[in-house]
Image (cartoon, grey):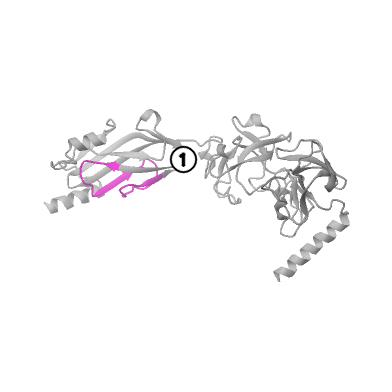
Amino acid sequence: MKRHWLLALACLLVAGCGQDRAITVVDAPAIDAPVAMADAGIGTDAPPSWGWVDFTVTGCEHPDGGQSCVGPAPLSVSLTAISPAAIDIYRWQFGDDSAEDLAPSPVHTYARPGTYDVTLTVGGPGGTATRHRTAAVTVIAAPLGAACQAGDQCESGDCMCGDGQPCPAGLDGGVCTVACTSDSDCATGVCADLAPSDPAPEPAASWQRRACLPACTSDDDCERGFRCQALVAGDGDGWISGCFAPGILVPMGGSCRDANADPDPARCAGGLCLDAGARGLCSADCSTVPCPEGAACATFAALGSVCVARCGDELSCDGDPGLACQAPADGGFSVDEAADPAGYCTPTATALTSGDRQDARAERRRRSRDTSR
C-alpha cells in the first residue's frame, strides 16, 4: 500500500498519472467548506475521504460575493487549499508566465493587468484531485496615485519613478500619474507643478515635472504613506492640494539650503528659497499669485512680496537662529491680511545687503569645509 501511495505522489509531481482515485473539478460552483467537510466526516468519527478540493483567494475584492478576485496591478494574493482529506503535495498554476508553486499556501503577485485562471492539483492519502477555476483572478490597471513598477500597470500608462528611475525615498516605489498642464487633464485628480522653481532644475529628475496627483482635503484622503500637501498648480494659477510623498518638497517656512549652504529653490514646494536665516527659507512669489493656506503675503523692503508661514503651536521657524515668529511691526514688513497674533516666520534681519549675504554664505562654506577635515 505504501509503495502504491509513493508512486501516486511521484506521478502527481511529474504530470499526474490518472489513477482510479483521482478527481478533477473544473469550474464547479463554490463549495460551502464547513458543510462539505461535515458531510465528508470531518469533526466526526467517520474517516475523511476525497470528494473535492477547492481553494480561497484573499488580498483582493470579491465583487458581489463571487469567486472572482479583483484588484489593481501589481496585485499580490494569498491562496489556501480547502479539502476534506489530508494533503501532502500541492501544485499551483497561476495562469501567468510564472513557474508552478509547490507551497501549501503561496503568495503570488500578478504584475500586469489581465484575467488569469488558477489550477490547484493536490495529493494525499485520499488520492489526488484537481480544481481549475477560470478567471479566478482579475487584475485591473491601477488608478491615479496607486503604487506601480511600470507604466503598463497604470490606467494612464505613466508610472512616475517606475522602471528603475532614480528617485528620492518615498517615490522610489513608483506612483501612477499622467503628464498635465491643468486640472482638466487629470479626470478626478489635480495637476501639480513638482518643479516650480525658476529656472527649473537642470538636469531635471524624472519626477520634477507637471503631473496629476490624487486630490485631497486631508491626509486621510491619501494612501501609501502620502500626505495632503499644498503644491503649485500646474497652470501656475495658484495652488492645489494633492497627495504626494512627504519630505521631498519643503512647505512654507522650511529650510532649503544645499550642502554648500547655497539657496536651493528646487527643494521648495513654492519654487523659491529665500537667502535668509541660517538654513534658508522656503517661500513663493506672491506679487501676482495668492499664497497657499497657512501662509500670508508679506512685503519686505529687501525681499519684495513673498509668502511667509503663519506661526502656530508646532512651528518654531525650523529652529533656525536667523528666523523668528514676528509681528509685522517688529519684523519690518507688512502683510495682506489682518495681522495674525501668533506672528509670522520671518528673517530677524531683513536689511542685509547683497554683499553681506554673500560674505555670510562664504563664511558658512568655510566653516563647513573646516568641519569636514
Q: Quadrant of the C terminus?
A: bottom right
Front-most of 79 and 98? 79
Q: Does residue 157 appear in the picture of this structure?
A: no
Q: Quadrant of residue 67?
A: top left
Give the left or right position of residue 143, taking residue 118 as reference.
Answer: right
Q: Amino acid at mark 1?
A: Arg
Is 235 situated above or below 17? above
Mark 1: secondary structure:
loop
Front-most of 29 and 333? 333
Residue 78 position within the rendered picture, expressed as x and y whole percent measured from the top left: 37, 43
Residue 138 position within the rendered picture, expressed as x and y whole percent measured from the top left: 41, 35
Front-most of 364 and 15? 364
Residue 286 position within the rendered picture, expressed as x and y whole percent measured from the top left: 79, 39
Q: Quadrant of residue 223?
A: top right
Q: Does residue 335 appear in the picture of this structure?
A: yes
| Part of the protein shown in magenta | 81-108
Residue located at (77% from left, 51% from top) = 324
Say few, some or many: other residues with alpha carbon within 10 Å of mark 1 (under 14 / 14 to 19 / 20 or more).
Answer: many
Is 329 situated above or below 29? below
Q: Farthest front residue?
A: 341
Residue 84 on the magenta span: yes
Residue 365 on the magenta span: no
Give the left or right position of residue 100, taking residue 167 as reference.
Answer: left
Q: Farthest bottom residue?
A: 373
Picture mark count:
1
Residue located at (72% from left, 69% from top) = 371
Label 1 sits on residue? 112
Name the magenta segment's main secondary structure.
Answer: loop
Residue located at (38% from left, 40% from top) = 58
